[in-house]
Amino acid sequence: MSWILAFLGFTLLVFFHELGHFAAAKWVGMRVEKFSLFFGPPLAKIRRGETEYQIASIPLGGFVKITGMNPEEELEPEVRARSYAGSPVWKRIFVISAGPFVNVLIAFVLLAGIYLVEGRAVPGVAVSAVEPGFGADGTLEENDRLISVTSPAAAGNDGATASVDRTVLVDGKDLTDEQQEQRVVAARDLISTGGCGAAATGKAEGGAPEVARCEDPQPLTIVVERDGERLTKQVTPQYDEELKRYRLGIGFGSPLEPANVVQASTESVTTMWMITRLTVEAMVKVVYDPEARKEVSSVVGGYEATRQSIEIDTVQAIFVLALISLSLAIINLFPFLPLDGGHIFWALVEKARGGRPVATHVLEKASIVGFALVLVLFAIGLTNDIGRIADGTGFGVR
């Protein structure tokens, strides 16, 4: 089922993107010849007025065909007046911008909906998930705010004695992000010793310690805040054979508090701005940073990340779709033909030239360069995605 839902999610993002172009073109009076979901030979089609609507056979993207996208196309005067090339620059920019705008709007609505339903993150550390079968199951709850973690020390644990406890204060309402991360790492490392002072034997991938199993793991004292009340819980860690360390079976996240419409909207805009900045920075780094190129993903990676998120959690799946929708808008606005941003760029060039159209051969050369850049980026992303699938690295979802 996750395969089908992920496909439907991607299809809807494409559909609404093209619907943005279509609706804007109709609104300003351009002549739309065809609205197609997907590419290739049509599977089904119907004509309504001057526009043909179709579903094609190759499920990759879609398109809206507007009369006169080729400025040298021979057209009757009455038709040319309603063509893309024959329309004022502002109309062309409006129509081309409508697709990415719809993707931005979708991302905003999805993210705001998540914050409205789930709440917004506030400073501090909370239990983000409780894994069944581990010590925290039935004792700690999601969104419990973590105040402190205390482990009874044992001989051999950094020279400590059994009479001295070790405590990590996790609560960090007034801490910087870096300081908060340091406390989370310290709490995780303390938990990994199993409450019995198990000695570290090395470091696993990601920096987490690997420790030896001890004969008698001891309960940790966990102080949490739940619904405004401080509670003290005793939780015994369990050894994870795969990770080679003790675990409580919890995830670390930010505490959530209810958000109204204004707060949810503000959080949505803040998140979108952060994603936009990171996406642009990543695209720039691709040019000169080999490590950044390893992080690029294609539509295959986006689809697989969405599918895996659906299997794990509905909210996470919606969040991933929002990120993909916003990323589609950002990438589409890069000023290279055949991307939407390329059409906007050359329309602005025409405006700067006093309305004199840019020569067709210039646009053709620009299209070749832009198409080559898109292909290279897609090839890098697809290669990375195939490698992640082949070696089991995955897409950072699970």
Image (cartoon, rainbow, N blue to C red):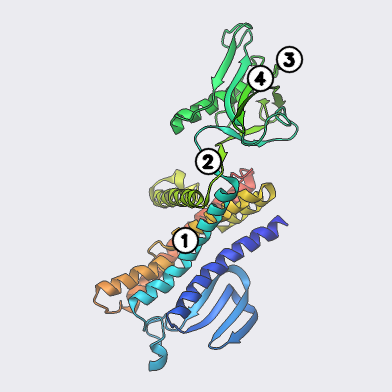
**For residue 231, which quarter of the picture?**
top right
> Earlier along the polypeptide chain: callout 3 or callout 2?
2
Q: Nearer the viewer, mark 3 or mark 4?
A: 4
> Earlier along the polypeptide chain: callout 2 or callout 1?
2
> Earlier along the polypeptide chain: callout 4 or callout 2?
2
Q: Position of residue 316 (x, y in %)?
A: 61, 48
Which residue matches tag 4?
220
- Identify which amino acid the numbered label 2 is placed on: Ala
Which residue matches tag 1?
329
**Which SS class for mark 3?**
loop
- Identify which amino acid the numbered label 4 is placed on: Leu
Between 371 and 145, the one nearer to me in the picture: 145
**Which SS class for mark 4?**
strand
Q: Position of residue 341 (x, y in %)?
A: 40, 65
Which residue matches tag 3?
216
Tell me the distance, in whole angstroms, between the alpha carbons under discs 2 and 1. 25 Å
Q: Position of residue 236 (x, y in %)?
A: 71, 22
Tell me the distance, in whole angstroms, between the alpha carbons under discs 3 and 2. 37 Å
- Identify which amino acid the numbered label 1 is placed on: Ala
One can see residue 199 in this view: no
Task: Kindly indicate whether the residue at mark 4 contacts the one at mark 1 (C-beta within 8 angstroms).
Answer: no
Q: Is 225 above or below relative to 356?
A: above
Task: Kindly indicate whether the residue at mark 3 contacts the one at mark 1 (C-beta within 8 angstroms).
Answer: no
- For residue 121, the mark is 2
Q: Is 298 above or below relative to 31?
A: above
Tell me the distance, in whole angstroms, between the alpha carbons under discs 3 and 4. 13 Å
Give me the residue at 61% from left, 56% from top: 303
Residue at the farthest right position: 133
**Quadrant holding the N terminus:** bottom right
